[in-house]
Image (cartoon, grey):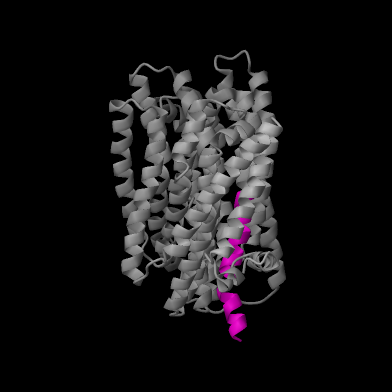
Amino acid sequence: MPGKKGKAQNNFLVQGTILAAAGIIVRLIGLFYKIPMTRILGDEGIGYYNTAYEIYNIGLILSSYSLPLAVSKLIAQKREERQSGDAQRVFHCGIALGAFMGGVMTVILLFGSDFIASNIFKSPGSALPLRVMAPTIFVFAVMGVFRGFFQGRGNMIPTSVSQVIEQLVHAGVSIWASYDFLNRFADRDNPLSYGAAGGTLGTLVGALASFLFLGAMMLLYRSGRGKKRNKPCTMDYCQVMVLLICTFTPIILSQFVYQLSGSVDNSMFGLIMDGKGFSEKERLSLLGIYGGKYRLLTNVPVAIASSLGASMIPSIVVSRVAGRQKEVRHKIYITIKFNMLIAIPCAVAMFALASPVMQLVFGDGREMTRNLLMLGASAVVFFSLSTVTNAVLQGIDLMRKSVTHSAISLGIHIVLVWLMLAQLNLGVYGLIIGNVTFALVVCALNWVAIGKALHYHQEVRTTFAGPFLCSLVMGLAALAVYHGVHALIPSNTIGLCAAALVGCGVYAALLLRLRIVSRRELREMPMGGLLLRFGRVCHLI
């Protein structure tokens, strides 16, 4: 029995890893399709695309982005309380709420795109791609409830598969449509705006493909249940809707404030640099490098934190409802540690190999793009940690803390970015510094709140210090291998691949040799058994 209990307790990490693997695949597909898109549209066209995407993200967050988390949390809670009828009503109310809010926001963006893009972001060329992408919010709102339903039942596979399908279709349509629209409307005033609109068309078509898949999965689930009847409901639909809104609102406010920093950056950069005499082309080219290259790369490892956080919320709720506080603390510990074991070496690798990575991915060997990645590499760690700690606060019903902390950090961020842009004239480097400090402040505030609420303090030596020291050695080894191989074979790709292989081997060996990860922790972690066998074969354990 203990073995089964332990397996059940740690299933959330396995499910989270499934979702994280899908998230990484999705981000990698996003990275790869942005390469040809960037070359088709150039930095200016990608600037239009990214600005439209930032506005779309605001609308998505305000309407329905956090609905899957709220639905999954309530369904997990009701299932643990053995109130399956109420869980079903949570799903029904989620569909109604998502359709309403997604529909309203879609209409707002369709009719307000010109005003928002021109007056707030100083980017008139972003209005057309925004209009094309606006209906995606309605599709995502309903689709997100399906995802929340399965996640609340501890099954991350439908969400994972749907995300991969969405991104594959998104990538194919975006590349084709951006090229086709750019050539089809080459005689218009701003053909790059049309090319960016082709890119955003992929977002809509990808979401529709994912929605159809999840709809089919839901039909299969319904047919598999047959005529099994739910238990009597303890709440009517009005009560469930109120409960859902009360759960949904703090999460949506938290996510809105947390994600708003990127849109604030774009808006402030456009307004301030416009006042300094920069043309729209110059501004959008710099934003294209910042958003389409730097942030695109750093967001890939952060996908792991987002996925683990999504799987951890319903799992923590189940443990809290059952009164297993020790289990709650252990889940927080192992999730944060697993996350840091990945985020820290990713950040160090991006710092050490910034120039080769930028050359390989984007064919961009400029000093500025290299410096941007080096300066902002630490954001990978801080955003990963702040994402997971936000999920912890949501799981232990301290969602207001998450909102407050993000708001405080955003206020500091706005002042800091204004100072660096308007007074210090740091340009796009100011956005990088602001990006790092925003996540750092959220981390610090979340950490204090979690410690007070749960009397919990994360172990430092093997969670942070050990992985950091191992990563430093890994980074030096990888850099040495890159330059050595590149001197023999003048190929950036071969040198970078050799450096990555050696770096991964050195990092794994150091983790095992220095006992940064215990045998018990390895057994709990996904693929930990494989790493354990590797350590025994190499006499590292």
* Place of residue 10 in the rendered image (x, y in percent of width and height, measured from the top left): 57, 72
Q: Which residues are magenta?
A: 1-25
Query: Does 508 appear above or below 437?
Result: below
Name the image quarter holding the N terminus.
Answer: bottom right
Magenta: main secondary structure equals: helix
Task: Please identify the quarter of the rendering in which residue 427 is found.
Answer: top left
Answer left or right for 57 relative to 527: left
Q: How many marks?
A: 0
Q: Residue at x 34, y 66 (%)?
A: 451
* Place of residue 101 in the rendered image (x, y in percent of width and height, measured from the top left): 47, 49
* Place of residue 254 in the rendered image (x, y in percent of width and height, measured from the top left): 39, 53
Q: Residue at x 58, y 64 (%)?
A: 512
Say if the magenta span includes residue 17.
yes
Nearer to the camera, 102 or 441: 441
Task: Please identify the quarter of the rendering in which residue 172 is found.
Answer: top right
Say if the magenta span includes residue 169.
no
* Place of residue 289 in the rendered image (x, y in percent of width and height, measured from the top left): 51, 29
* Residue 149 in view (yes/no): no
Query: Does 23 appear above or below 245?
Result: above
Query: Residue lying farthest bottom?
Result: 1
* Residue 401 in view (yes/no): yes
Nearer to the camera, 95 or 498: 498
Name the image quarter holding the C terminus.
Answer: bottom right
Q: Residue at x 58, y 23 (%)?
A: 42
Query: Does 99 appear above or below 360?
Result: below
Nearer to the camera, 121 or 488: 488
Answer left or right for 446 relative to 316: left
